[in-house]
Image (cartoon, grey):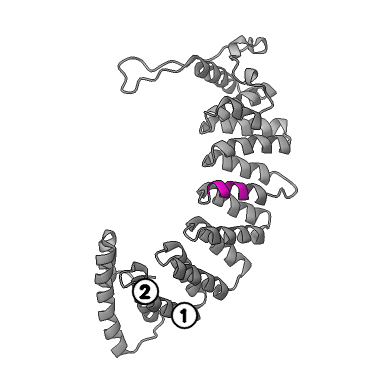
Amino acid sequence: MSSDSDYSYYSDLSEEEEFRLYREIPEWSDITPIEISDAPEGEPFHILYNQTYKDLFGYFSALLQKDEISKRALSITERVIKNYTSTYTAWWYKYRILEQLGYDFKKEDKFLNGIIRFNPKSYQAWYYKQWLLDHEKILRDQIPSLRIIFEQDPKNFHAWSFALWYAKRWHQEKEVFLLAKKMCQSDCRNNSAWNARKTLGDMLNISPRSEFEESIESLKAVSKNEATFNFAIAMIHKDPSLIHEFEEVGKLLLKKNPLNMFAWLIKLFILEFKKKNGNENENEKNQNEKEKEEICDKLMELDPIRIPYYTLIKEGKICYQ
């Protein structure tokens, strides 16, 4: 639950009004709250609810049961959401009310920004943000708010999922791509940013070569980085001519550190890539098969948690790609 001082950020109510019991408010006297009972003694998990909780959910449940569509119903859903953000029933009820009463975007946006500020990983809040924007007729720039979120939590999966949706829905692919690119540069291990960059780069037809070169520079700087490694491979699948440069990078990394797992993975990828594309004669095929077995043995030594995986590759049951 947020502290008392937090409410001013996303509420029009005073602190006194926020924490007042509904049973003490004359305007709510026509509502009979549903009793919220403590779990009986002897139950495996005995829960004792305080009076504030019982009052809030008692009146919320009563309005929900009678399906009241009103401003007071909206206010109680918001109070539930502020205090217990994961209560998806309150979010659903809020949607239902707004669809019938209408809403002011700026007011809803203020409310939502407050929720996300204190609950950045609430998927309900991000879905609601998506719902709000999907109902708009004009573009509402989300890049500034996304920058703020990513400064606090650069790898927030829900925020990145929303960013991709926003880019597609409002044709902001370039803007979100540039944001993802900046986040990759800020933290080269940000897998979510690299994923967004790849997705939007495909949509924008960004040159695979330029993207590959940047990922390789990042891999050279931080050689044990799965995010940039996978991104580079994705670019090779788009432009197979990059395979030769990738091979040179693998040699460089192996020379710098013979125990670098990713250097050995590059060697393995090169062999599998050549085999898949038929770029080997019969003699090379036998030689490469032997080399693949040696590489897999080395990877089992360096990355023992994936021994079953490398065993399948070594036995030719699956391919590394």
Residue 242 higher or lower than 148, as above or below: below
Q: Which mark is residue 128?
A: none
Q: Nearer the viewer, mark 1 or mark 2?
A: 2
Kind of residue indicated by mark 1: Glu
Cβ atoms under marks 1 and 2 closer than 8 Å: no
Tag 1 residue: 245
x 53%, y 20%: residue: 57
Q: Is residue 100 left or right of residue 181?
A: right
- The image position of residue 113, as x and y in percent, is 63, 39
The boundaries of the magenta stretch are: 146-153
Q: Could you tell me if residue 10 is visible in this image?
A: no
* Residue nearest the viewer, comparing 217 with 104: 217
Mark 2, Cα crowd under 10 Å, few <14 / some 14-19 / many 20+, is: few
Q: Is residue 37 left or right of residue 165?
A: left
Residue 282 higher or lower than 77, as above or below: below
Instruction: Find residue 270 and report its image quarter.
Output: bottom left
Tag 2 residue: 256
* Residue nearest the viewer, comparing 262 with 65: 262
Instruction: Find residue 321 and report its image quarter.
Output: bottom left
x 28%, y 68%: residue: 299
Q: Could you tell me if residue 155 is visible in this image?
A: yes
x 49%, y 67%: residue: 218
* Residue nearest the viewer, comparing 305 with 222: 222
